[in-house]
Amino acid sequence: MTDTVWMDTENNLLCFVDQTKLPGEYSVCSVCSADEIYSAIKRLAIRGAPAIGVAAAIGLYCVSVRFEDREPQGFLKSLKETAKMLDSARPTAVNLSWALARMQKTAERAANSDIEGIKSALKKEALDIYGEDILVCKKIGQNGLSLLKNGFGILTHCNAGALAAVRYGTALAPVYAGREKGWDFKVYADETRPLLQGARLTAYELCENGIDTTLICDNMAASLMQKGVIDAVLVGCDRVAANGDTANKIGTLGLAVLARNFSVPFYVCAPFSTIDFSCKSGEEIVIEQREWSEVTELFFSSRITHPDVKVYNPAFDVTPAEMISAFITEKGVFTPEELQRGL
Ligand code: MRU
């Protein structure tokens, strides 16, 4: 499996697969300016909470090696300004601010050495964040497998697979772990309107990896569950509040409601970096609102709606903790009640 984001360690560049071009074109970009990194995250060329976090860490390092500051204090100030700017690219995925905060703390700890010392500490931290993401996702895959059986029909939403992390992903990690054991899952990927991450990205990466994959329109999930072909729903998340309320791609809440109705287990795959213990409940989670044009024209040859229609285009919704069967993390499987008691 190839990486989605990585560092060109010789030239200090952030490299990534441009997800806006998939599945038609597999295009690798290399960038090193704050504007390019901000734009790649904002326009979803790099997307998915873990991938955004890793890209921000590598990106911040790559920008900082080019700072002209000669004194640690000036360097730290430039680092803080760049981190603040990158952090504003997307508000809901906590991994973005988590990774940027980790990088800044590393720089502050190294501030009593010279600029080169701070830069090498930042490089190491960015590579650690990248390497940890691979291990964490692999572990989520193994832990998730304990809840599944060979032959299960699995419904997933948006893309929380390899393309949303460095490798493996979160919600699709158990699917890949099962395949390594010779298990055959039947994965149903919903399209995920309006930006079609399910149709464009999940279907692409699952097919490329030889997984039995069926694409459905978003409004077909209820009928599939009614037929009894879905044994589990696996989704990723952008921010889990301390009480277990979970923000993920818009439409996740609807699937949780359906899963409860049809008694299908609903699992949220969550690296600890996505759990925000400072956020009490889903009410505190900022939901990103995106351009109306994503709904009215993005994937059409011309606008398909009346020019005066208003659009509601939230990128995420919040699933209440009580609708989640369990969180599958790198440290084990936890119920929302266990999370609320503090892990
Ligand atoms: O807007 P996107 O495509 O970044 O949204 C991504 C999701 O909602 C994913 O499910 C989430 O980030 C988890 S990715 C492992």
Image (cartoon, helix red, strand yellow):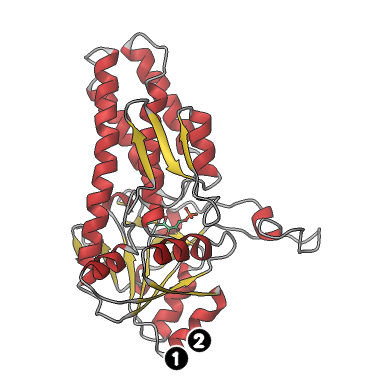
- Residue 156 position within the rendered picture, expressed as x and y whole percent measured from the top left: 41, 70
Task: Kindly report the distance in space between the C-alpha atoms of the residues bearing marks 1 and 2.
Answer: 6 Å
Hey, what amino acid is under mark 1? Lys
Q: Name the residue under label 2.
A: 223
Q: Mark 2 vs ligand 1: CB under 8 Å? A: no
Q: Is residue 109 above or below residue 152?
A: above
Which circle marks residue 227 in the picture? 1
Position of 296 with respect to 224 (left or right) is right
Which circle marks residue 166 in the picture? none
Identify the image quadrant of residue 17: top left
- Residue 160 position within the rendered picture, expressed as x and y whole percent measured from the top left: 39, 60
Residue positioned most to the right: 307
Question: What residue lies at 28% left-to-right and 28% top-to-bottom?
Answer: 123
Position of 139 with respect to 42 (left or right) is left
Q: Do the residues labelled 1 and 2 touch (CB within 8 Å)?
A: yes
In front of the other: 306 or 29: 29
Q: Quadrant of the N terminus?
A: bottom left
Hey, what amino acid is under mark 2? Ser
Question: What residue lies at 52% left-to-right and 61% top-to-bottom?
Answer: 200
Query: What secondary structure is marked by label 1?
Result: helix
In front of the other: 343 or 69: 69
Residue 269 in sight: yes
- Residue 84 position within the rendered picture, expressed as x and y whole percent measured from the top left: 45, 31
Question: What residue lies at 52% left-to-right and 33% top-to-bottom?
Answer: 36
